[in-house]
Amino acid sequence: MRYRLLTAAFAATAALNIAGPLQAAELEVTHWWTSGGEAAAVAEFAKAFDASGHKWIDGAIAGSGGTARPIMISRITGGDPMGATQFNHGRQAEELVEAGLMRDLTDIAEEGKWREVVHPSSLLDSCTLDGKIYCVPVNIHSQQWLWLSNAAFEKAGVPVPTNWEEYAAAAPALEEAGIIPLAVGQQPWQTTLAFQVLLTAIAGPDAYTKIFGEKDADLAAGEELAKVFEAAAQARSMSAKSNVQDWNQATNMVITGQAAGQIMGDWAQGEFQVAGQVAGEDYTCLPGLGVNEVIMTGGDAFYFPVLDDEEKSAAQADLAKLMLSPEVQVAFNLKKGSLPVRGDVDLEAANDCMKKGLEILAQGNIIQSPDQLMSADSLTQINDLFVEFFNNTSITAEDAQKRFVDLVANAD
Amino acid sequence: MHEARRPNPLFRNLSAKIAAIPMILTALVVFAGGTIWTIIYSFTNSRLLPRENFVGLDQYERLWSSSKWIISIQNLLIYGVCLLVFSLVVGFLLAALLDQKIRFENTFRTIFLYPFALSFIVTGLVWQWILNPQFGVEGIVRSLGWTSFSFDPLYNADIVIYGILIAALWQSTGLIMCLMLAGLRGIDEDIWKAARVDGIPMWKTYAFIVIPMMRPVFITTLVIIASGIVKVYDLVVAQTGGGPGIASEVPAKYVYDAMFLSQNLGQGFAASTMMLLTVLIVLIPWAYLEFGGKKRG
Amino acid sequence: MADVTIPVSAPPVHADEALVGPSGPRPRKVISRRNIILYGTLFVVAVYYLLPLYVMIVTSLKGMPEIRLGNIFSPPVEITFQPWVKAWAEACTGLNCEGLSRGFWNSVRITVPSVVLSIAIASVNGYALANWRFKGADVFFTILIFGAFIPYQVMLYPIVIMLREIGLYGGLYGLIIVHCIFGMPILTLLFRNYFTSLPEELFKAARVDGAGFWGIYFKIMLPMSLPIFVVAVILQVTGIWNDFLFGVVYTRPDYYPMTVQLNNIVNSVQGVKEYNVNMAATLLTGLVPLIVYFISGKLFVRGIAAGAVKG
């Protein structure tokens, strides 16, 4: 299977070669995919790129925004930009584009009919500024998952819940059985993630988009959001005894049945697989907490800084095309565990949970990730509030909601 | 002091002046220049890239209305005072013990110093484990039958900063000890001999003779510890990421997060300007005492 | 600053050789209550310091299933060196599956010149400030000390611009300069204060003998300052060897130091966390500073033995 994919990828790049000029160039690519599976996925890009006659110079740096940003900005302002770089798409790269530092990919996109092949098309929208396309979306990662330990519910004598309400209702029984109802790692980003998932699932995708996209403060003050904050308060007490730091330690509590569930992105599945557990038998996954089955179309994208060197610019174009070619998309995303950005490829190797994700994607139940809708600065303030609320039991749901409304009203 | 105070100042000391050129350049261009640059841009609304779009004191108003910043400062105060006191005391005591002409001095010194060599990321992780209530110290003491024993600093917002302090002390006292030891080794042998001849007890020799003689070394140590305190960042990120909640946030992390995570350079510059201002308030009187106070010769 | 020596300015008595004995504060017996307390204390403190190291070593020798069981203090049931091999030679960062070994020589190429240059500059600075003070020196020095308190991150962009202007951005030399700059405040302070604590008479005597700026530096100050040089080496080797941020911001991938690989192995957020490989990688990266500590520690001999004064 893998072998066939590989040859397919090679064939695709060979085809590219015929089309494009045959000048080989070295291209430095910065990204933050360094763990085992991620590295293997990047290798697919690199292999395909090298096969096209160019050379991929790998600049892998772990640690996404906080580490990547200073490097990118420094390299670009220092007059020595890399050939391509991973970056969160959406609003975060806006300024670089406005300053004319990023290459306009519109020609390549039109030639490759990206508008038609990229699915959902909102991915391409977040690469677009003033009608021009500046980045290549490469995958879709979703955060909206609730992972449940079937063994834990069995022990507590309650059926495995199918949505958040049932889950919250089962909490007392779980606690009686000595099980922590909800595992949450102490690191702030995990709280933020859990909270955002609660928000999108319970308030629903429309409310979410209005609040984060249109900064609708009235809606933020409304009843739907009150429910979200109540649910978050529930989650707060359900996770009161959870005392681990890393997300995978929390996942491990679910795997061992010490905790009943965890809200975490699709990458958590890797841990279940490593522990030899089977989806549906040992653990259950509920996308969108079983309430609103939506997933966020967050994901990774590549930007291409403007370069003087003509050969390198040509190589950039080749790389951009190649990243979206069907063969490379399949090879890359199977390794990465994420979903491809093209609707027209077949992922037969995906497991049950991944298939659920694909189905939701096919139905179009998708929302944009908050960093596509809101500036990083406003988002950080909101996230800070979530984190504070989640860790400080003296803040009531009403108080938190009031502060949330203020932040939304002032957001940009 | 010394000969440098003689008249005809321009060509006297020429080698010293030439030798000091790198220092002068660094001080003026990098540190003074960079700081002024930072202050100027703290009045702008720069986001991802520095831009000259001035907004007055907006960034400062927002800074001081942020509970994260206020907590950062409180944490820094607690952390700073404790670390300063403990690392000085422990560092000096260890150095004094090692200075007793003991065997295996090199081994002991390396043992106390090795934490300094290890990356913060993993150091934080190991202390995270040791301080974890389940499988760390608390779990072990409880399994010994002491079931009411409670020690979970990293998971309790009220004391989390002390959990970070434990790791910080472990990491940094070795270096302080080395500094102190170097200072002690700079003390003339004859002074010890003279004190012994006069029958002065050892603790008195340390307290009234040796420590005052080591004043310059203490100042060095103080500056090293203090600058480390102000800049503390990695350890917090590695151990708690600022959590639980925002209970272990520190100013340097606030600056970094503002600049590179929330893409608000202006806010980051404003926060660092406040930090540097505080440093200046402490530093200028000290410099005055150090240089202005005793023009000798 | 050396004015505090007054209480003991009485000429030292060399008459009774028996009294002098081994040069510690007190004469030494092999087994005494004092020694038991001394070594006992040191031993207990050493255990506290070694505990995390123990956890790290033990963890690095376990397989992942065993780590998942969760007892961090228990010794490994089945010892495996695979994590060490993986950390050094196999861990992948992007395309390159060469582990830490890939950046090792880059780290050496960065660390050696940076350490030597920064200490050379700072020791001369400190010496000039302590013994050859010139007008305005205090002002520069105060600014320099102030620089020690500036969070590095704030200075990232201004330094990028400066390096670009002098054409050193992106290469090894630029990075070395950056390390010298950020090492300068603490090191200069270190040397200045150490030199001022040395007896003034030494300096004066050498001046009377007609020695100049460099003569005194090399013949008198350097030999008497080995302990403080050791401290400076410890500070710089550790700081530069473990530096990550400057390494990635001011150079290209060809020059990336070992810590970039360490960061990539340890700092990946998504995906499976291999704690055993993390521990092994950290210990491996820490080895170089540790070896430096141990070897250079031999130079920690008593600085001002009576003999040195004569030189």
Image: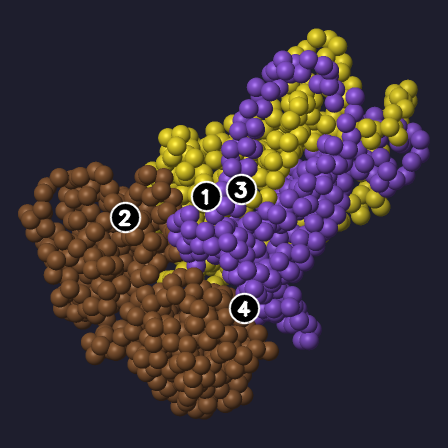
Chain colours: A brown, B purple, C yellow
The image shows residue A327, relative to residue C124, as above or below, that is below
Q: Subunit of mark 2?
A: A
- Which of these two is toward me, B132 or C79? B132
CB of mark 1 within 8 Å of CB of mark 3?
Answer: no
CB of mark 4 within 8 Å of CB of mark 1?
Answer: no
The image shows residue A201, relative to residue B60, as above or below, that is below
Residue name at image x 29 percent, y 52 percent: A97
- Which of these two is toward me, C233 or B84? B84
CB of mark 2 within 8 Å of CB of mark 4?
Answer: no
Q: Subunit of mark 1?
A: C
> Label 2: which residue?
A100
Distance between mark 1 and mark 3 Cα atoms: 12 Å
Question: Between tags 4 and 1, which lies in front?
Answer: 1
Do marks 2 and 1 share a subunit? no
Disc on res. B245: 4
Residue name at image x 67 percent, y 58 percent: B78
Residue density around tag 2, few if under 14, some if 14–19, many if 20 or more, within 10 Å: few
Quadrant of the rendered image containing residue B176: top right
- Which of these two is toward me, C279 or B244? B244
The image shows residue C155, relative to residue B25, as above or below, that is below
Quadrant of the rendered image containing residue C137: top right
Quadrant in which the C terminus of chain C is drawn: top right
Q: Position of residue B201 (x, y in %)?
A: 90, 39
Q: Earlier in the sequence, mark 3 or mark 4?
A: 3
> Label 1: which residue?
C156
Question: Between tags 2 and 1, which lies in front?
Answer: 2
**Amino acid type of the residue tagged 1 in the rendering:** Leu
Q: Secondary structure at mark 4?
A: loop
Distance between mark 3 and mark 4 Cα atoms: 31 Å
Q: Position of residue A325 (x, y in %)?
A: 15, 58
